[in-house]
Image (cartoon, helix red, strand yellow):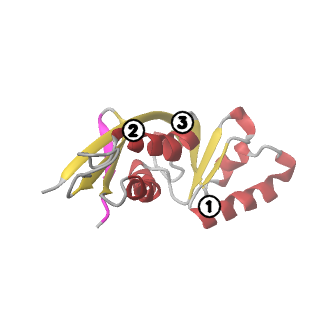
Amino acid sequence: MTFTVTRHIGIDAGHRIMTHGSKCRAPHGHRYKIEAVVAARRLHDAGEQTDMALDFGFLKEEMMRLIDGPCDHGFIVAVADEALLRCFCPQPAAVEAWLDAVRADVARHGFHASSECALAGKLYVVPFQPTAECLARHWHERLAPAVEQRSGGYARLSEVVVWETPNCRAAYRPA
């Protein structure tokens, strides 16, 4: 027997797929819908989450902190997309040092998030093309430890689904 709970949030973000052979190579944006599916074999038998796998509010807080906060109304860029990254450098005269710092942050943490960039927006740099598939895996990896901690070990994040458009989605479930 398994219980599942699902929560979704929506963000607006831009991206581009720099190697795409068609229109997705150009910078553009989406109204993403991100769903987190949590599974538990049993429910809490005491405390604040009695008879729950994971409180929906806890799940929302973590999704807002880890996904909405750094990405909503921002631009998600592959670390390899140097041409686009240069547009976000807050001090063009120091672009090489800035790029080195961004690359180092991505190598160390798996992403770089900043609101101190040109164009007065948020920048979220990732070590992959920002496709829906890769974003689903990335957000799963970031959210899973928070789900386990907030549930006291009762629940695990079983799937993250990223809707790029109302008709197109990608999901990630670890093996």
Q: Earlier in the sequence, mark 2 or mark 3?
A: 2
Instruction: Give how far across and how far down residue 106 sits, in percent.
Output: 62, 61
Indicate the secondary structure of the residue bearing disc 2. helix
Return the residue nearer the eye: 28 or 75: 75
| Quadrant holding the C terminus | bottom left
Q: Earlier in the sequence, mark 3 or mark 1?
A: 3
From mark 2 to mark 1, how far is it between C-alphas? 29 Å
Q: Amino acid at mark 3?
A: Asp
Say which residue label 2 marks. Answer: 57
Q: Amino acid at mark 2?
A: Gly
Q: Amino acid at mark 1?
A: Val
- Residues rendered magenta in the picture: 167-174
Instruction: Give how far across and how far down residue 32 sits, in percent.
Output: 42, 36
Say which residue label 1 marks. Answer: 106
Q: Is residue 173 magenta?
A: yes
**What's the residue at 32%, 45% (across, down)?**
49
Say which residue label 3 marks. Answer: 72
Q: Are marks 2 and 1 in contact (CB under 8 Å)?
A: no
